[in-house]
Image (tube, rainbow, N blue to C red):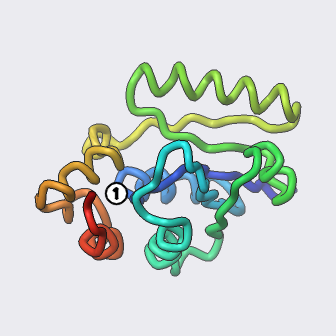
Amino acid sequence: MTQVALFPGTFDPLTYGHQDLIDRAAKLFDRLIIAVAVNERKKPLLNLQQRVAIIEAVFKNHKNIQVKGFSNLLATFAAENGANVIVRGVRITSDFEYELQLANMNRSISETLETVFIPPTEKYAFVSSTLVKEIAQMGGDISKFVAPEAVQALQSVKWR
């Protein structure tokens, strides 16, 4: 049986922390779909097309990774794509508490949907998209935290 997993997120922007988790998850599953959420509630700085394009560029040489945008329930998106596993990164205790709640909700919607938590590599444990955007907005160097494609996208943003 082919194991298909989803790695969902807003990825606004994709960070090296995300990349590390995706690389590691891709080794565990036959196919990994990076599910880029529309998620207007988070008011993403980059639009869906930009976020998908950055991720596709970064992972273009990974044969078992696909990138897809979505705006419906994650459990529905998983079923539509034949995925039975959700992969999530957890940095701190509060991440785990929130992610556990989501995992239980997703499992209550779809009994066959499991969630796997992957802790970050130590050197990326503090990196978040929110912090990267704050640094970029203040004119700081974000190249240590995100791929060149993301640096370029954030440099083109007209900050409010």
The residue at the far front in this view is 160
Please give left or right for residue 85 compared with residue 137 in the image.
right
Q: Helix, strand, or loop for circle 1? A: helix
| For residue 48, above or below residue 84 | below
| For residue 8, above or below residue 90 | below
Residue 159: x percent and y percent? Answer: 25, 61
Residue 80: x percent and y percent? Answer: 86, 57
Q: Residue at x 28, y 68 (%)?
A: 158
Q: Nearer the viewer, residue 102 or 64?
A: 102
Say which quadrant the C terminus sits in.
bottom left
Q: Nearer the viewer, residue 40 or 13?
A: 40
Residue 119: x percent and y percent? Answer: 44, 36
Q: Residue at x 34, y 73 (%)?
A: 153
Residue 143: x percent and y percent? Answer: 20, 65
Which amino acid lies under the numbered mark 1 shown in the image of this protein?
Answer: Tyr
- Within 10 Å of disc 1 (Cα), the crowding (few <14, some 14-19, many 20+) is some
Q: Residue at x 39, y 40 (%)?
A: 120
Q: Nearer the viewer, residue 33 or 153?
A: 153
| For residue 133, above or below residue 153 | above
Q: Residue at x 72, y 23 (%)?
A: 104
Which residue is the site of mark 1?
Answer: 16
Q: How many marks?
A: 1
Please give left or right for residue 141 compared with residue 95 in the image.
left
Say which quadrant the N terminus sits in.
bottom right
